[in-house]
Image (cartoon, rainbow, N blue to C red):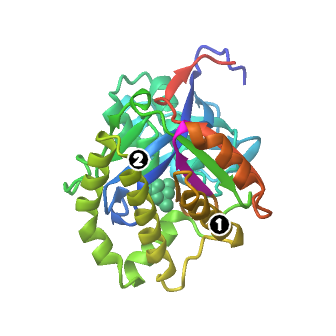
Amino acid sequence: MNESDPKLRSAHSIAHSNIALAKYWGKRNSELNIPAVSSISITLEALATKSSVTFDPHSRGDSLEIDGERFDTEKISVVLDLVRTQSKITDVARIQSSNNFPTSAGLASSASGIAALTIAAASAAGLDLSRKELSMIARRGSASAARSIFGGFVELHAGSQQDGSDSFAEPILDREDWPLEVVVAITQSGKKATSSTTGMLSTAGTSPFFDSWVNSAPAKVAEMREAILALDFQHVGELTEQSCLAMHSLMFTTVPSLIYWNEGTISVIREVQRLRASGTECYFTIDAGPQVKIICEPANSASIVSAISELPAVVEVRRSRLGPDAQLVNPK
Ligand code: PMV
């Protein structure tokens, strides 16, 4: 099918991955994909997904290719269905994406991928939506994707409405206002063992710590927001490590246990502690995978990259500034 066919509606976008400083784990409504707790993240410039969406009446079903490989369309069809309902388009969609980092390995490829898809699909369908509305659509595909609609420091509200109408992301601080950097230590580039959604359901049903995690989240998120707005790096860093370790404690105490770490993960945590003890201020965080992200101020990122690169279990190191909003782009 010729992409210049006027009957085909298409759009192209780019979105950036994010990592949560105050983590979310667990859902208060699985069907509407509403998180059980609010979260705060930073968007990462160096980890990006480019996506092209084409609504095509001649295709058989929605299709997704990431870097040339076919992927399951379950998560993306949820987003596409919302866009189709709002725009009254009935055509199926072809999505072609490319990531400049390993897919499904705990580097939040679903966050950048679904944010990029949402922006492109809404535009291809002719919808004129606010970023808040876009974040609510993206949330249905993957809650962390709601945060990747925005750049800089972003909060995703868990909200309290049954229908999820108050569960959306919004920016809390621009990246220019606090240009932190992140060093990403990749300790394994294979795909992760248990998806976040499956893991979260299992944790909610079995971890003895899940209720206290949910109950303590509002105060912790408020403390993180205040520390960010005060540009208090030490406080943000300490809260980041506490949130990460609390989330992984939930995972460890899930039955059967969810251990996303590998030996390399531990070696990077130890190196961050060693760097800090020797005067280089930096803090670690880890999502549902073995990779470690290290938050630092720009003056320290080069020395952190060289220290982390020396570790035998680290296969690749990336350095990132904070990223911008997801946006539409011209076709290449
Ligand atoms: O929304 P999902 O399915 O991408 O889950 C993300 C969960 C964590 O990355 C582990 C934590 C977070 O808040 O991003």
The span shown in magenta is 292-298
* Amino acid type, mark 2: Phe
Residue 234 lies, with reference to residue 83, above or below; the image says below
Q: Could you tell me if residue 65 is visible in this image?
A: yes
Q: Residue at x 64, y 55 (%)?
A: 104
- Answer left or right for 158 relative to 6: left
Numbered marks: total: 2
- In this picture, is 277 found above or below 230? below
Q: Nearer the viewer, residue 247 or 128?
A: 247
Question: 279 or 149, which lies in front?
Answer: 279
Q: Which residue is mark 2?
A: 233
Say which quadrant the C terminus sits in.
top right
Circle 1: element type: helix
Pinpoint residue 98: horizontal percent, then vertical percent: 69, 37
Could you give the CA–CA distance between mark 1 and mark 2, rounded to whole angstroms?
23 Å
Q: Is residue 297 above or below residue 185?
A: above
x then y, percent, for residue 144:
45, 50
Q: Where residue 2 sits: x, y (%)?
A: 72, 20
Query: Which residue matches tag 1?
Result: 265
Does dot 2 land on a helix, a strand or a loop? helix
**Kind of residue at badge 1:** Thr
Q: Is residue 286 visible?
A: no
**The quadrant where residue 185 appears:** bottom right
Q: Quadrant of the N terminus?
A: top right
Cβ at disc 2 under 8 Å from ligand 1: no
Residue in the picture at 65% in, 18% down: 331
Residue that sits furthest to the front in the current view: 278
Question: Is 294 in the magenta?
Answer: yes
Residue 36 figure quarter: bottom left
Residue 243 percent location from the top left of the image: 40, 63
